[in-house]
Image: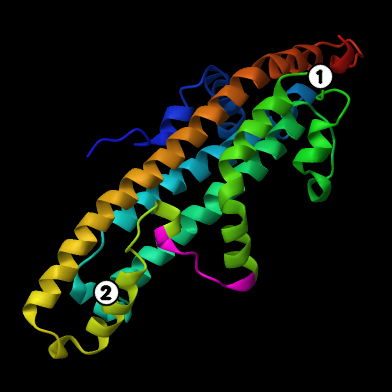
Amino acid sequence: MKTCSTKVGAELTSHPMVRDLFALARPLILNEAQTKTLTVADSYSLDVFDAISALINSFDLLELCRSFATLTPSEKYLKGLKINRHDWLEYHISTFLITFVTIGDEAVAFVNVVHHLGIDPRDCHAAAVKRNKWVKDTSIPTQLDAIENLIKPHRKNRNHLVHGGKVPSLSSLVKSGNLDQLKGFSLALQHSPEAFPQTMHAKLDAAYVKAFIQIDKALDREACQLKTTVWQLLTDLHKFYNKWLSILSSNVVSDPHTN
């Protein structure tokens, strides 16, 4: 089924800013001798390239998580791993959740690099970037707020998962009332399949098919909305990148923030 988020990371590579970066970075990366004599402008472009690559890779991971979550392997394969379908779902949806929230941090780091703010990565959080004097009166704070508004509903679940090991409720994540109830049935069938009639197996299979459709739509919707906001951030940052690159490529000593 073709959905909005199909190859989201690949879609981001079609953004004009990303195309410009790839065109500049590719020869620098391929030519090892050239990387030893990088200009200031080359180093800047490579730093920005690394930052945008992290965002693209995260969106690719979102797509992989969505695919794995909704394309569960055979019961025989799962049995070999000593897990059930619900364990498989929880693992990949949890990875989706962690990556989804991480994109917010990567977007903030990207702004820091493009604007050449010089904020230490350990202190590079949204508030510090948005209140920076070179950023606060631009459209960038609005774009970062838009990204955070999408991420905020999941941040608490992500923190509970990462810092407390608490697996989030799949029902609440995908707005499904019975998804968590399937966990107990899956566990019971995993360890005592012979104790349940074949009709019960068939009902559970049908319930998971329905759940997979709900999960696929929910994760696709989340990824698409986030991609749209990140795309707009790239659009707004493109002009700042071009401004910095132009000045760094010249021999004129100047501060791009004031030009």
- Outermost residue toward the left in this view: 198
Residue behind mark 2: 78
Q: Is residue 50 visible?
A: no
Q: Is residue 170 magenta?
A: yes
Residue at the image position 50 percent from the left and 69 percent from the top: 167
Q: From the viewer's perspective, is residue 69 above or below residue 61?
A: below
Cα–Cα span, label 1 and label 2: 53 Å
Q: What residue type is disc 2 on? A: Leu
- Image quadrant containing the C terminus: top right
Of discs 1 and 2, which sits in the foreground? 1
Q: Position of residue 67 (x, y in %)?
A: 32, 51
Task: Tell whether 36 sits left or right of 186.
Answer: right
Front position in the image: 21 or 109:
109
Q: Is residue 27 above or below residue 123?
A: above
Q: Is residue 211 left or right of residue 106?
A: left
The foreground one among 156 and 54 is: 156
Quadrant of the snapshot with the N terminus:
top left
* Amino acid found under the numbered disc labelled 1: Asp
Kind of element beneath mark 1: loop
Name the residue located 36 percent from the left edge and 50 percent from the top edge: 66
Residue 72 picture quarter: bottom left
Which SS does the magenta portion mostly show? loop
Circle 2 Cα neighbour tier, 10 Å, few/some/many (<14 / 14–19 / ≥20): some
Residue tagged 1: 137
Task: Give the secondary structure at mark 2.
Answer: helix
For the magenta stretch, what is the residue range? 164-171
